[in-house]
Image (cartoon, rainbow, N blue to C red):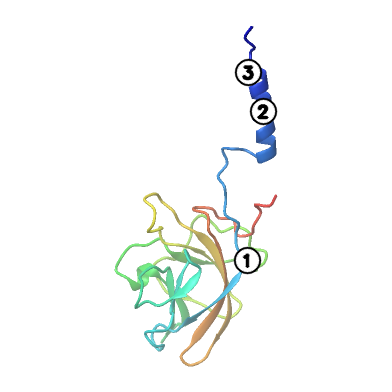
């Protein structure tokens, strides 16, 4: 006598789905806590000083060692302190950009999908909050950009340096900026 095992199989699948969540949902990396980063003026700083920010690593980087970055910091003679998106510095098209946020850093929970400044210098001052979008990931053949937020904590010193508080969502094309993966 052969038993029909379909009802038992269905019961097991339902139990596993309830216990483990939806098996078809992507597994997301938690959004890290805010991290402080300091960039040195690209013009007046030493070549060995980190003047650029790489959203994929969340680090300040040296422009003489890598071109894996999304924007640089400098003091513009007319505009004062600015963040300069990749396309403005290099002779290439890039989606890396910044957008002034309309709310505070701690309450900013999602980056906009569009509207980023990608090809001109963006004036900054202490206390300003921005959303940011990265260049396309160089490690993947598919479109993968990261979204994040930064707050300008201080601009000081000679050569000038800017201290930023930054959060980057490490999940491709995900605009959430506050971790909700524990829910």
Mark 3 crowdedness (10 Å alpha carbons): few <14, some 14-19, many ≥20: few
Contact? badges 1 and 3 (CB < 8 Å)? no
- The quadrant holding residue 47 is bottom left
State which tag comes first along the sequence, 1 or 3: 3
Q: Position of residue 8 (x, y in %)?
A: 67, 21
Tell me the element at label 1.
Answer: loop
Q: Residue at x 39, y 53 (%)?
A: 140
Question: Would residue 37 appear left or right of 92 to someone viewing this image?
Answer: right
Tell me the element at label 3.
Answer: helix
Contact? badges 2 and 1 (CB < 8 Å)? no
Q: Residue furthest bottom?
A: 158
Q: Nearer the viewer, mark 2 or mark 1?
A: 2
Residue 155 sits above or below residue 176 on the image? below
Quarter containing the N terminus: top right
Contact? badges 2 and 3 (CB < 8 Å)? no
Q: CA distance from mark 2 to mark 1?
A: 38 Å
Q: Nearer the viewer, mark 1 or mark 3?
A: 3
Instruction: Identify which residue, 3 or 81, lies in the foreground.
Output: 3
- The quadrant holding residue 3 is top right
Q: Residue at x 61, y 77 (%)?
A: 127
> In the drawing, what numbered circle is on residue 12?
2
Name the residue tied to disc 1.
33
> In the drawing, what numbered circle is on residue 78?
none
Q: Residue at x 63, y 13 (%)?
A: 4
Q: CA distance from mark 2 to mark 3?
A: 10 Å
Q: Position of residue 90 (x, y in %)?
A: 32, 71
Name the residue tied to disc 3.
6
Q: Position of residue 170 (x, y in %)?
A: 53, 58
State which tag comes first along the sequence, 2 or 1: 2
Mark 1 crowdedness (10 Å alpha carbons): few <14, some 14-19, many ≥20: some
Q: Position of residue 177 (x, y in %)?
A: 60, 60
């Amino acid at each position: 006598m052969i038993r029909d095992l379909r009802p038992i199989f269905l019961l097991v699948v339902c139990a596993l789905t309830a216990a483990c969540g939806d098996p078809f949902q992507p597994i997301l990396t938690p959004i890290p806590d805010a991290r402080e980063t300091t960039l040195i003026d690209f013009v007046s700083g030493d070549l060995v000083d980190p003047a650029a920010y790489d959203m994929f690593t969340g680090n300040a980087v040296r422009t003489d060692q890598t071109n894996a970055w999304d924007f640089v910091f400098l003091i513009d003679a007319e505009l004062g302190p600015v963040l300069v998106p990749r396309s403005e510095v290099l002779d290439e098209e890039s989606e890396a950009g910044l957008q002034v946020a309309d709310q505070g850093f701690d309450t900013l929970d999602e980056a906009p999908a569009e509207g980023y400044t990608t090809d001109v210098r963006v004036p900054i001052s202490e206390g300003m909050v921005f959303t940011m979008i990265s260049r396309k990931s160089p490690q993947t053949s598919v479109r993968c950009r990261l979204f994040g937020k930064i707050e300008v904590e201080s601009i000081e010193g000679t050569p000038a340096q800017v201290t930023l508080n930054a959060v980057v969502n490490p999940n491709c094309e995900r605009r959430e900026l506050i971790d909700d993966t524990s829910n």
